[in-house]
Amino acid sequence: MSFDALQALREAGHPVDLLAVEQRSVLSGLSELEVRVLNSVKGRLEAVAGEVEGQDLKLL
């Protein structure tokens, strides 16, 4: 069975289906090690994020 990078990223909570086709194509070529690194970075960032994260809001 071959490695499915996109599915592994989906399972880790990355919103890959919201990306452009070209971006998904790049991600689909990632190795297992590269996906593990991305998932590790995501996990570490989420671990230190506060409960509320700020967002930019522009009003007219």
Image (cartoon, helix red, strand yellow):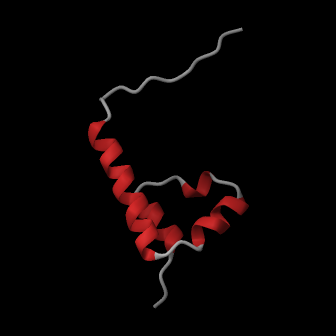
Name the residue located 66 percent from the left edge and 68 percent from the top edge: 25
Position in image of residue 19 (x %, y %): 64, 53
Q: Residue furthest bottom?
A: 1
Q: Quadrant of residue 54?
A: top left
Position in image of residue 6 (x %, y %): 53, 68
Q: Residue furthest left?
A: 47
**Between 31 and 14, the one nearer to me in the picture:** 31
Please state if 56 lies on the left or on the right of 19 as rendered. Answer: left
Name the residue located 56 percent from the left edge and 21 percent from the top edge: 56
Q: Quadrant of residue 33?
A: bottom left
Please state if 31 lies on the left or on the right of 50 as rendered. Answer: right
**Between 12 and 31, the one nearer to me in the picture:** 31
Please state if 12 lies on the left or on the right of 15 as rendered. Answer: left
Name the residue located 49 percent from the left edge and 87 percent from the top edge: 2
Position in image of residue 30 (x %, y %): 53, 71
**Count of marks placed on residues:** 0
**Between 32 and 4, the one nearer to me in the picture:** 32
Name the residue located 49 percent from the left edge and 75 percent from the top edge: 31
Give the quadrant of the C terminus: top right
8, above or below 59, in the image: below
22, above or below 30, in the image: above
Please state if 29 lies on the left or on the right of 40 as rendered. Answer: right
